[in-house]
Each structure stands twice: as C-alpha cells, then as structure tokens.
Amino acid sequence: MLTDQELLRYSRQILLQYVDIEGQLRLKNARALIVGLGGLGAPVALYLAAAGVGELHLADFDTVDLTNLQRQIIHDTDSVGQTKVDSAVRRLTAINPDVRLVTHRSALDADSLAAAVAAVDVVLDCSDNFATREAVNAACVAAARPLVSGAAIRLEGQLSVFDPRRADSPCYHCLYGHGSDTELTCSEAGVIGPLVGLVGSLQALEALKLLAGFGEPLVGRLLLIDALTTRFRELRVKRDPGCGVCGAPHA
C-alpha cells in the first residue's frame, strides 16, 4: 500500500486518471535499469526517482569530468572526480530517499549485463556508443524486457521503444543493423545540453507508461528530433523477420 507521505508526494501524478492509485503502486513495485548516467541518463534517473519508481539500477563505469557538467544535470561541480554512480546516488537519495538504488560501477560484460537486465522490468539505454547499445538490445531480447532507447548528438535526437514481449515489435538491430565504423560521440562532435535533457525526459516518460500501464508506448515508431529547427518527425519501423537478434532462428 501507499503511505500517507507517498500519497502526498505523488498526489499530482495520482490525480491523473491514467495513473491513479493502481498505477502508482505499479511504479512503487517496479524496477528499472539505467545504462549510462550521462546526458540522457541524468534526466531519466531524476524523473524516475521523483515519480516513485521503487528500484533503480544504475550502471556506469565512468567518473565525472568538468566537461560533463554542461549537460549531465544529475552531477555538479563537487562531483568532479567521483564515479558517476556515486554522484547520482547522492542526488537521487536527496530527491527521494524511499527509492532503492542498486549500483553497477564496473563495465558490464555479457554475463553481468544479462543478469542486470533479467533483474528489472524495463531497461533504459542512455549510453553513447553503438557497441553498448547492441549488447543491451541483445540482452533485452534474450530476457524479454522492454528497452527504451535514446540517442542525441550535435542538434539531432532519436527515441524509440523496443518490446520483445510483442510479436510486432522490432528490436534495435532491426533498425540499425551493425551500425557504422565512423560513428561519432558527443566528445568528438559536440551536443547541445537541452537536447539530451529533452530526449532523456521522453525516455523517462516512455518508461513510466510501460511500468504504470497507460498510454501508447513508442513501439514500432522512431521519433526524430531536429533541435536546430524545433521539428519532430515520426517514422514507422517494422520488425525484420531475418534479424540476427530477434528474427526467427535459422534451421
């Protein structure tokens, strides 16, 4: 049950007919894995903690650098030199001490990633490189866990939800294949801070919809954001029957 303090804390959210008491209880009993506590993971973690998601699993092996502070709003100047996980724990505990925090401070290999994904109800990929995204996607397909995937670079953002529990849902590999050897990171190409905040906030929204059971998740759709002109486009994405990750196994 929700305590009196929880009813008060989440009252504006509970007022929504799509959430109500039942939805808030689902959030309280839910577990989410956030892979990456940088520009995308910062707003994701903040909003999920504030919304009352009961257990957040935080995965990042990096430390806070001064160059991160332009966009990674969960960290502050005093966090420079700390692990991003420890910095995030401090901030999230201050926001909502009732949320349980499970930490992963080392890089996740295949086995530990599989275990981390299987231990939660939803995974949010907030990483900044293709290899990690591919590994997270494969683990989500294997464990049948929904994946909320976001990306942002320069002035362009992308967002989609891949849900292997649904027969019609593509996976990340269906959409991006093997990626590109020339993929750039934000440290090489740059990125504007509010854009990652926007994409991360939308990732948090999609996760809340999945966990509380309301709305229409962004499954089978790719949202493209052009921050330079403030334009949004949506593309339909179909599952690839021959996908090497989620497709039917070959004889």
Image: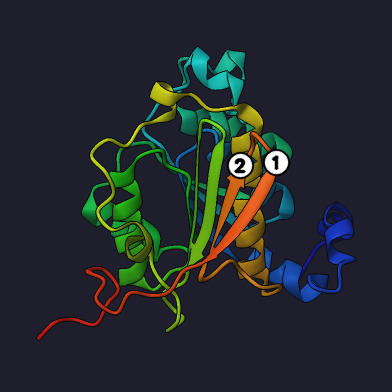
Secondary element type, mark 2:
strand
Q: Is residue 86 visible?
A: yes
* 163 over 9 or under it: above or below: below
**Amino acid of disc 2:** Asp
Q: Which quadrant of the figure has residue 95?
A: top right
Q: Is residue 103 left or right of residue 12?
A: left
How far from the left and from the top, in percent, is residue 119? Answer: 41, 63
Q: Which quadrant of the figure has residue 40?
A: top right
Q: Give the residue displayed 45% in from the left and 15% down from the top.
A: 81
Q: Give the residue displayed 38% in from the left and 36% down from the top.
A: 105
Q: Farthest residue in the front direction?
A: 229
Q: Are marks 1 and 2 in contact (CB under 8 Å)?
A: yes
In this orientation, which residue lies closer to the viewer: 97 or 66?
A: 66
Residue 226: assigned label: 2
**Amino acid of disc 1:** Thr
Q: Give the residue displayed 88% in from the left and 59% down from the top.
A: 11
Q: Farthest residue in the left direction?
A: 251
How far from the left and from the top, in percent, is residue 17? Answer: 86, 74
Q: Give the Cα separation between the discs numbered 1 and 2.
A: 6 Å
